[in-house]
Image (cartoon, grey):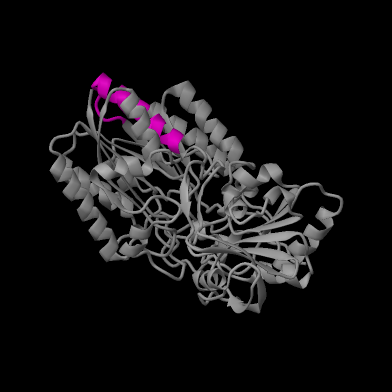
Amino acid sequence: MARIAVASFRHETNTFAPHKATLTDFETGYSWPVLTRGADVLPAVKGYNLALAGFVERAAARGHAIAPLLFASANPSAQVTEAAYEAIVQMLFEELAALGPVDALYLALHGAMVAEHLDDGEGELLMRLRQKLGPRLPIVVTLDYHANMSVEALEMATAITGYRTYPHADMAATGARMADWLDGHLASGAPRPAAAFRQTPFLIPLFAGCTMREPAAEVVAAVARIEAETGVLLTFAGGFPAADIPDCGPSVYGYGSDAAAVRAAVDQVADLVEAHERDWGGAVLDPAAAVAIAIKAAEGALRPVVLADIQDNPGAGGTGDTMGLLRAMLDAGLTGAAAGLIFDPHVAMIAAKAGEGALISVALGGKHGVPGDKPLPGEFKVIATADGRMTGSGPLYKGARLDLAPTARLRLGGVDIVVVGKRVQAADQECFRHLGIEPAAMRFLALKSSAHFRGHFQPIAETIIDVAAPGAMAADPAALAFKRIRAGVRLSPAGAAMREQA
């Protein structure tokens, strides 16, 4: 039996987003638990679809003793402030020092954290830990599918693996997979494995990396097959394409006992990714064109037409309050429609105080200065209010104890609008149900999410239309003003169709 220290420090950084992540953002949390230390970590994450929870459950079942250090996660945004990064790292080292000797360290990280003073938040953390713990102690890591992997992180860790689904239905399963790998590694007494790493020469648009569509589905299936055939611990990372750092972009990486076999496995997957370069795109529509197509698609349909507001995704640094798609829906006179989640705590509080049935004259959303956006004024009817507390039931948030702060269901024209007090993407049907909206019964659903919504909403959708309304997460990375990305990287996959206009 080994004594394994565990911790999680996660942030996905959109360096083009308007607001940075402070320590307060980690202390208040969002979809996941708030900043937690020591013995309180395990009960805080129990039952969540989180890599840390999956690792702990599997490692404990294998007889290992778990020593929790810290859990810290904040909503995707611009850079983590230097003060927040250093404070959380200090907490982690304090908890580690208090533990005494351990046999291994497991970290559930994201892989796309940028701080004010650091391009590679994870690589820096791993370097400091390696300096503290020495070269021999096993340090194993799980990363998000959207990691911007660096060679520094690769070399500092004993082994790293990442999620294989987007939507991330397999976060807990990835933690469990790493627990199995570490168990075998500890039992074997083998030296640190050989590692290989290859970056692709182009960025993949965030929505196009969804593994419920091609070519991502083919790539992740190949990863699992090649890993099973070769024994190489193998990962394809789609990258997070809104980070102006040298290592931004997709990569393939792997670990194993035979260096040549590891390199061959990595190259096999990377070759497949690059062979599909022209396929890593997808058409998106401006709001008016998208709504017009949605109206036609809804004729005679028995299921809702989903409009995905992919550029204002709170899960990728979006503000969650731009009004472009909602305006187009209202202009077209849609009925039987629901839209969410609109982040506007001020309006949510006004609605809560006014009560159900009241009419409130407010300016909704548009409060973050996103180019091309402005608030939507109107007289909204308050249909329902709630405290925002619910338990997720979809693949991403299943078991998650969500707290969206005061929430309100407002009606303007034929559209019911879910307004929330916390910035969270619309990836779970419970976010609508807790206010009395049954998503499957709607004619139209407008969702602020790039792809995570697909896990819970695609099974009920007649069709899905990707929409490029104003937002901080550009559908086409070439629209972003990169200054520091490494030379030679194509900002859009060559030849990929990225936008259609009406």
Q: Looking at the picture, does residue 258 appear above or below residue 359?
A: above
**Does residue 69 appear anywhere in the picture?**
no
Residue 67's image quarter? top left
Position of 154 with respect to 483 (left or right) is: left
Looking at the picture, how far across and down is residue 208, in whole percent? 60, 50
Residue 179's image quarter? top left
Q: Looking at the picture, does residue 308 appear above or below residue 50?
A: below
Looking at the picture, how far across and down is residue 267, in whole percent? 47, 35
Looking at the picture, how far across and down is residue 225, in whole percent? 53, 26
Please give the count of numbered marks on the rendered protein. Answer: 0
Residue 373 forms part of the magenta stretch:
no
Is 370 in front, or is 222? 370
Residue 180 forms part of the magenta stretch:
yes
Residue 502's image quarter? bottom right
Q: Quadrant of the N terminus?
A: top left
Residue at 76 percent across and 59 percent down: it is 336
Looking at the picture, how far across and down is residue 293, in whole percent? 79, 59
Q: Looking at the picture, does residue 172 appear above or below residue 121?
A: above
Position of 150 with respect to 199 (left or right) is: left
Query: Magenta region: which residues?
Result: 172-193
Position of 121 with respect to 269 (left or right) is: left
